[in-house]
Amino acid sequence: MKLTPFFKRYLADTSAVSSVLFAASATALIGASAFAVDMGSLYLARTKLQGLADAAAMSIDESDYATNAAGTVSALIVQDGSNDVRVVRLTPGTYTPDTAIAPADRFQPVSDPNNATAMEVALEQDVPLFFGAILSGNNRGKVQAKAIATRANLAAYSIGTRLTTLTGNIPNQLLSAFAGTALNLTTANETTLAGDRIDILSVGDALSARFGLAGQTYSQIFARDYQLADLLEAYASASTDASSAALLNAMAAKVGTQSVPLAAIIDLGKMGQSDFHDTLNPLRIDALTLARAALQLSQGDTFHAQISVSAAGLTSATLTIVGNNATAHSPMMTVTDAHNYVLRSAATRIYLDTQVATSLIAGVASIHVPYYAELAPGEATMTAITCRGTSSDGVTLGVKPGIGTTSIGTVDTSQLDDFSAPLTVSPAQIVNTALIKVSGTSTLTLSGNAEQAVFFSLDDIANHVIKSVYSSDIVASIATSLVSQMQLTVSVLGLGLNVSSITSTVGTVLGTIAPTIDTVLGSALKTVGVGLGVSDVSVDRVRCGMPVLVS
């Protein structure tokens, strides 16, 4: 028998080639599957261990840094049922929340735990391997996790939010102008909104439910832009006042689809890093302030409104108010423990063009009196949080009032929206007839803007006390002060006209109408949350020793 034909037939026979190839690759396939199973097991164990490390780091009270950190962590491990978890190290240190420092360098170990403000926890765990022993001879793998937590003293504070003693229909007109539609708010409606203190995190809950954001942190929810109507409806959902909620829903039905960046109104800081809502310690702002901020921001970087004003003694009056949103620099309200965070009210311009009826000057039916005010932003910086468990606990703010200038005079109203340069104020043509021309100007400048320390006790914070900080040269009556120092220039044609008499008469008319002008200007300023030579500040909440994960 010849073997050559047999081998040829054998080599040519491919009927079982797939079986041969499978047998050759089976080891590799089994090894890859075993590797995938073991890697999945290690990944799940690592994730669970990281959660335990996070909880351990946050569970250590600052008073335990030097004494019982190990006991606290060990008790948590036992409670979790993870008896095979080992504590690799507990490192006390300090944490500096400064963006100028690289994240890896913000935590620094300290030798004396009594000086620590943060704690690093490192854990380790052996994880059984299902197939590791077959491939490597080792039936256990090792996972590690690390977490750093600090105890933060947090406070929420705001500037420029006093909305009490609103006058007449000016607030409704201005808010309607910001909205681009008639809101038809009465003084009673405004009072209802101003008295409704809405929990900010409840607004986040309402937005989360509306837009399917479950599982996101509050910072992520607040980082989105929302349509104005959606935001007003979220305010309504968060309100516990049925009347206020109805008003907010009615406003939402009237406004458009303008976009509003919610984070430009409220910055939650570290409080926004979680999705936990502590309903027993709400963070609140009144509904009118929230609505006003949303309406202003819906206009973009600059808000602009022009309305006609009716007031006793005024034949006609047009009020133009323009604001450069301070939220381009910082939100209206913030929650923070960083002392270098500055809140600013809006830079604001107001132009009130009035005609005042008079019969005291022959041939003159009315006089023209334009008022202009330019306000620099007020500022508030949190300088200290005291948490010693004593009567001296509280929050200290460093506040600079919103200073500026106010004048009787005319300006180029087409330039009101341009905040890159101050406007030129020209003498006002108070009387301008063929026979009599009276012009005049007056300017009042407030310059006292030194920072003033304002302390809020825990009782002040609990009672939502608003404190006003005044410039050193603040005046009680803007218009009256302007009139008292006004210089008039009189030009007459014809005989029998007494210049000094005309000057005296114009001065009398201006003095009579000054209190009305003060009321109009004051109500307009309060509506947009600013003041000339004054900053209103408040601290809504303080929380001592809040555990915060930083790594």
Image: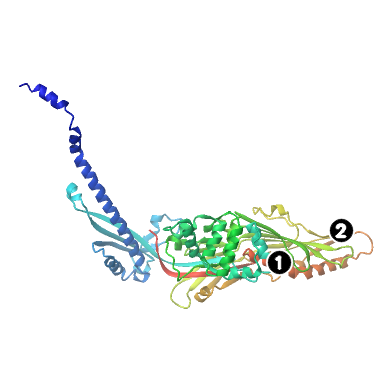
Residue 202 in the image: state x and y as whole percent.
Answer: 49, 65
Q: Which residue is mark 2?
A: 433
Dividing the image into 4 quarters, which one contains the C terminus? bottom left
Report helix, strand or loop for mark 2: loop
Q: Is residue 39 above or below residue 251?
A: above
The numbered disc on residue 355 is none
Q: Is residue 345 visible?
A: no
Point out the image quarter for the N terminus: top left
Residue 170: quarter of image: bottom right
Furthest residue to the left? 1
Determine the CA span between mark 1 and mark 2: 28 Å
Return the residue found at the far front.
15
Mark 2 nearby-residue class (10 Å; few <14, some 14–19, many ≥20) = few
- Which image quadrant is residue 495 in? bottom right
Q: Is residue 245 left or right of residue 544?
A: right
Q: Amino acid at mark 1?
A: Val
Nearest to viewer (mark 1 / mark 2): 1
Q: Residue 62's spot in the image, x, y percent?
A: 37, 69
Return the residue found at the far bottom. 391
* Image position, residue 71 (x, y; %): 29, 69
Does the CB distance between marks 1 and 2 fall below 8 Å? no
Give the residue number, with chain letter if any, for mark 1: 520
Measured as percent of width and height from the top left, residue 401 is found at: 61, 66
Nearer to the camera, 471 or 52? 52
Q: Report the amino acid beneath label 2.
A: Thr
Query: Is residue 46 left or right of 157 when viewed as pictured?
Result: left
